[in-house]
Amino acid sequence: MAGSEVTVYVGGLTAAFGDSGGRIRERLPLFFALVIGINFLLLMAVFRSIAVPLKAAAMNLLSIGAAYGVLVAIFQ
């Protein structure tokens, strides 16, 4: 209740899945940035070009977006 000093703890699988989902959601942009950044640097070193890594980074983002779009379409 609002204004009381009662502490409520929630447990079980639903709470655990909610916590882990929130943690993954927090870290996902950092993960994408690291993967695309390392990919960009490696491709730039191999091909000695800026166009190839930029195109590959754009395609990585498009493929990730498409995969998540399909997942949303299936589960909704």
Image (cartoon, rainbow, N blue to C red):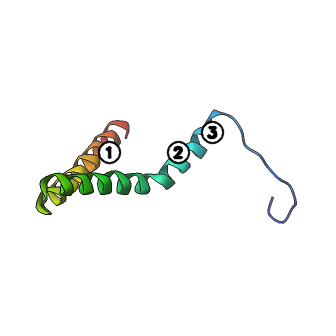
Q: Residue furthest right?
A: 5
**In the depicted structure, whether residue 76 falls above or below residue 5:** above
Q: Residue furthest top?
A: 13
Q: CA distance from mark 3 to mark 2?
A: 8 Å
Q: Residue furthest bottom?
A: 3
| Image marks 2 and 1: residues in contact by CB distance under 8 Å | no
Q: CA distance from mark 2 to mark 1?
A: 15 Å
The disc, 2 or 1, on the residue closer to the chain's N-terminal end is 2
Question: Residue 63: percent from the left, percent from the top?
Answer: 23, 46
Q: Secondary structure at mark 2?
A: helix
Q: Residue at x 36, y 57 (%)?
A: 33
Question: Residue 76: percent from the left, percent from the top?
Answer: 37, 41
Q: Residue at x 19, y 57 (%)?
A: 44
Q: Residue at x 77, y 46 (%)?
A: 9
Image disc number at residue 42: none
Query: Is residue 58 shown to the viewer in this render?
Result: no
Q: Residue at x 84, y 66 (%)?
A: 3
Tell me the residue that label 3 is attached to: 16
Q: Secondary structure at mark 3?
A: helix
Q: Residues within 10 Å of mark 2 (few under 14, many from 20)?
A: few
Image disc number at residue 68: 1
Image disc number at residue 21: 2
The answer to which of 56 and 42 lies nearer the viewer is 42
The amino acid pointed to by label 3 is Ala
The amino acid pointed to by label 1 is Tyr
The answer to which of 29 and 15 lies nearer the viewer is 29
Q: Where on the picture, by quarter, is residue 41?
A: bottom left
